[in-house]
């Protein structure tokens, strides 16, 4: 595709993305980072971990995103007594046909909200691994492909620890992004209250895009030009989490990011450039998505926890150390 034609298409699709954000904003006030992450995630088919206290509109935002994107949406409330079959499906004996039939579970939807995922035991959490990684589910001796697109959005509460189970490291690494959802500003909260008084949160959203549009977005992202120096820069940022050149950073990190982080960092940077309407990737794109990609892949050391240094502060130090091309 010619560069001029590609650039024009990028601008047109960037306008569609702005329209999608505008439609979601009819329901959601603020939370721009979460909405951007949802759009990037569906383009990349990358799963997202949403962390925030209750009442910050996580479920509402995901539901609004699915409605404006014309995607099937299912919410799974994770509890200690949840079974893998409740999510994936199971085999049921048909008395009339005298044979077993497969009854598929709620996982067969485009957008899955795994609410309070850390309240279910590891056996249930691990049942999601094949679905998240392979985009397929095995029930008995049969394997079923999942819908396209398919994305898991998992929420967890950062405060409540009673009755929770830590996520396996293998599963955490399969999440493309981790989004930290904070409280709204004073002005945003006033707007939220006003909208509730007018019952604006109950309105039906217009379908701005559909699956065909999302597939076209993926094609355009694949067409983006990514300079070799950008790839090297992204890998250098990830390597700095594993092999820090400065002792001050080395003492703060117990375990660094995996190679999957490099893959997601470049892919997310490409998608961000696309969402901005550009046909090329810049180092600023890498910097902007670094926190989303790396914050759940770095395990802070005891020294970092003692100093109450968050992974975001560690990432900020790393970005300052790595030379920008």
Image (cartoon, rainbow, N blue to C red):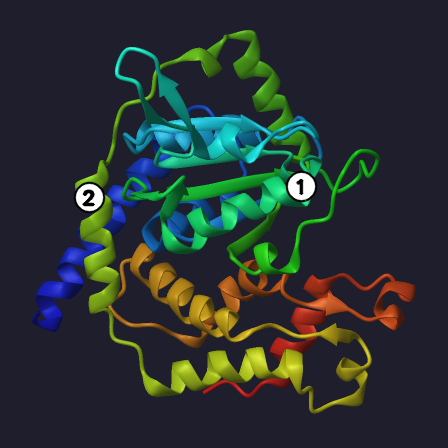
Using the image, determine if residue 26 lies above or below residue 290.
above
Q: Residues within 10 Å of mark 2 (few under 14, many from 20)?
A: some
Q: Which residue is mark 2?
A: 213
Point out residue 103 in the picture as x, y percentages from the top left corner: 37, 25
Using the image, determine if residue 144 lies above or below residue 303.
above
Asked if residue 221 lies left or right of residue 264, the reply is left
Residue 33: in sight, yes or no? no
Q: Which mark is residue 312?
A: none
Say which quarter of the image contains residue 194.
Answer: top right
Mark 1 / mark 2, whichever is N-terminal: 1
Which residue is located at x 80 percent, y 33 percent? 163
303 and 122: which one is in front? 122
Point out residue 114 in the picture as x, y percentages from the top left corner: 55, 35
Q: Residues within 10 Å of mark 1 (few under 14, many from 20)?
A: few
Which residue is located at x 45 percent, y 24 percent? 27
Which residue is located at x 88 percent, y 69 percent? 302
Residue 255: in sight, yes or no? yes
**Image quarter in which the C terminus is found:** bottom left
Most extreme residue toward the bottom is 245
Most extreme residue toward the right is 306
218 and 29: which one is in front? 218
Asked if residue 238 lies left or right of residue 7, the reply is right
Which residue is located at x 30 percent, y 60 percent? 274
**Label 2's element?**
helix
Q: Which residue is mark 1?
A: 182
**Label 1's element?**
loop
**Image quarter in which the N terminus is found:** bottom left
């Amino acid at each position: 595709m010619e560069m001029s034609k590609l650039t024009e298409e990028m601008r047109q699709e960037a306008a569609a993305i702005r329209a999608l954000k505008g439609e979601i904003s009819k329901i959601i006030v603020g939370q721009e980072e979460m909405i951007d992450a949802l759009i990037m995630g569906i383009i990349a088919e990358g799963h997202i971990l949403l962390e925030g206290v209750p009442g910050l509109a996580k479920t509402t935002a995901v539901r609004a995103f699915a409605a404006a994107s014309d995607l099937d949406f299912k919410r799974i409330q994770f509890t200690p007594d949840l079974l893998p079959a409740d999510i994936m499906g199971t085999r049921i004996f048909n008395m009339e046909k005298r044979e077993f039939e497969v009854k598929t579970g709620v996982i067969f939807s485009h957008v899955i909200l795994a609410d309070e995922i850390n309240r279910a035991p590891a056996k249930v959490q691990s049942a999601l691994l094949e679905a998240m990684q392979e985009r397929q589910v095995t029930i008995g001796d049969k394997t079923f492909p999942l819908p396209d697109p398919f994305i898991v959005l998992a929420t967890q509460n950062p405060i409540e620890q009673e009755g929770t189970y830590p996520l396996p490291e293998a599963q955490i690494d399969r999440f493309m992004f981790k989004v930290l959802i904070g409280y709204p500003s004073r002005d945003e909260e006033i707007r939220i209250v006003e909208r509730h008084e007018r019952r604006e949160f109950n309105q039906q959203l217009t379908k701005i895009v559909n699956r065909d549009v999302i597939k076209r977005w993926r094609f355009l992202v694949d067409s983006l030009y990514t300079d070799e120096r950008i790839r090297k820069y992204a890998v250098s940022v990830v390597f700095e989490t594993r092999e820090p050149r400065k002792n001050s950073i080395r003492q703060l990190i117990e375990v660094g990011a995996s190679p999957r982080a490099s893959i997601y960092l470049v892919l997310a940077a490409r998608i961000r450039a696309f969402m901005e309407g550009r046909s090329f990737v810049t180092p600023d794109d890498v910097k902007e998505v670094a926190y989303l990609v790396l914050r759940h892949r770095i395990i802070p050391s005891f020294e970092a926890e003692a100093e109450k240094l968050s992974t975001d502060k560690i990432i900020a130090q790393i970005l300052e150390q790595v030379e920008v091309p």
